[in-house]
Image (cartoon, rainbow, N blue to C red):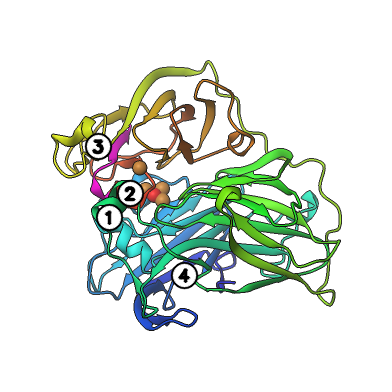
Amino acid sequence: MPPLLDTRAAGRLALSATPGSTVFAGGRRVATAGFNQAYLGPTILMQNGDLAAEVQNNLDEPISTHWHGLLVPGEHDGGPHLPIAPGATWQPEMSIAQDPATAWYHSHIHERTAQQVYFGLAGVIHVTDGQDDARGLPSTYGIDDLTLVLQDRRFDASGRMVYNPSMMDMMHGFTGNRMLVNGQVGATAVVPQGIVRLRLLNGSNSRIYTLFFDDIRPMHLVATDGGFLPAPVVLDVLRLAPGERAEVLVDFSSGGAPVLMSDPDQAYGVLQFEVDTALARRITRLPEQLDGAPADLSGAEIATRQVSLDMGMGGMMMGGGGFAINGRPFDMDRIDFEVARGTVERWQIRSTMIAHPFHVHGIRFRVITENGSPPRPENTGWKDTVLVPGEAEILARFDQPASRETPFMFHCHILEHEDAGMMAQFTVT
Ligand code: C2O
Ligand code: CU
Ligand code: CU
């Protein structure tokens, strides 16, 4: 597990982006970057209330620290308008007020996000209310509550981790040839012989996972990006696109050594599990209900907007690979939408050429339809990122303010697409 950074007692959070080097199993030492460590960052545990954060940049290039999934104003959001210069420190005085959720943080410098996240500038956030015992959910960090950052990385013939996207990689997103889980190759997750909670983050630049266990044991989905579901939903396969999180419960009481795999058609291993009967098993039954009750926003919308995620011929005349939203590549100086604070809007999103994972800052949303049908089980709860194979409609209330100086982003979470211009921005006033 990444180290746990518990901010609850002091209400303070100190991160420092640092250069480092990492030897991934069997490979060669490569330059990486992380928060407080050489690759990735600690898992930040936070609760509602004031949080005085401090992010120091010890790298020799600007970074930012975006809190993906935290509902905070634009000035605290850490997007591309809030760069931290080399040697500088950013100190957002935040106030956390949201349902428990698994969120994450990562650098978000325009045109550099893909590279900076790839080499390590990301980590996980747990927003907790301390009520998981009452919910009957496992919550012992690293024992029965595992945080798993899934990333694929490309290693060359000499075992060096490389990032060198070709034109094809730009079009489809850069994918790797090895799996890393929490920055490790070939690790094993040792779990107690009971119910275990897996907090899965797809922290990959572009790979979409279709997760399943090799012995077909079910996963019980309890939370999506923005919080708990009303009750667990049993799944044999779980689709997880870049930027998405899912919390699932898995029953290991029958023992065994199952492997979490991806892609039933062309299966590859993601993570080996191993049951250790010496580990304390605290939870042995699945909860029947959770207290998550995603609001029904339907009918409350005052505006409908169209969002077209463009690439290829459609936007080719714009230059590059035609990466754009509504025909226009990202421009830091252009506000694309102006949303009235406190109102509900319906956004109709359309993907071109391939399925794009669509993310919006500053809100959590409900998925109303996917290709005209009700959403898949994975998309029935609160979301901030959704894979859009063709079309999707979402509803959200825009409560957090964002000014022209620090607007919120909406973009494709394939990081190569985002950097190339499939991103736009909006104010909330
Ligand atoms: Cu996780 Cu704008 O990003
Ligand atoms: Cu975000
Ligand atoms: Cu995309």
Q: Indicate left or right for 96 with 251 as reference.
A: left
Mark 3 residue type:
Gly
- The quadrant holding residue 377 is top right
Q: Which residue is mark 1?
A: 82
Mark 1, secondary structure of its residue: loop
Residue at figure coordinates x 80%, y 66% from the top left: 256
Say if the magenta span includes residue 428.
yes
Q: Earlier in the sequence, mark 2 or mark 4?
A: 4
Rendered-image quadrant of the N terminus: bottom right
Q: Closer to the observer: label 3 or label 4?
A: 3
Q: Residue 75's mark?
A: 2
- Give the x, y percent position of residue 71: 47, 45
- Give the x, y percent position of residue 225: 55, 45
Q: Which residue is mark 4?
A: 41
Q: Closer to the observer: label 2 or label 1?
A: 1
Q: Indicate left or right for 320 with 207 as reference.
A: left
Q: Earlier in the sequence, mark 1 or mark 4?
A: 4
Instruction: State the separation of the CA atoms marked 2 and 4.
Output: 22 Å
Q: Closer to the observer: label 2 or label 3?
A: 3
Mark 2 residue type:
Glu
Q: Indicate left or right for 422 with 363 as reference.
A: left
Mark 4 residue type:
Gly
Instruction: State the separation of the CA atoms marked 2 and 3.
Output: 33 Å
**Dot 1: within a 10 Å radius of its alpha carbon, few (fewer than 14), some, or many (20 or more) residues?**
many
Q: Earlier in the sequence, mark 3 or mark 1?
A: 1
Instruction: State the separation of the CA atoms marked 3 and 4.
Output: 35 Å
Residues tagged 2 and 1 counted as in contact (Cβ below 8 A): yes
Q: Which residue is mark 3?
A: 312
Range drawn in magenta: 419-429
Residues tagged 2 and 4 counted as in contact (Cβ below 8 A): no
Rendered-image quadrant of the C terminus: top left
- Give the x, y percent position of residue 28: 39, 83
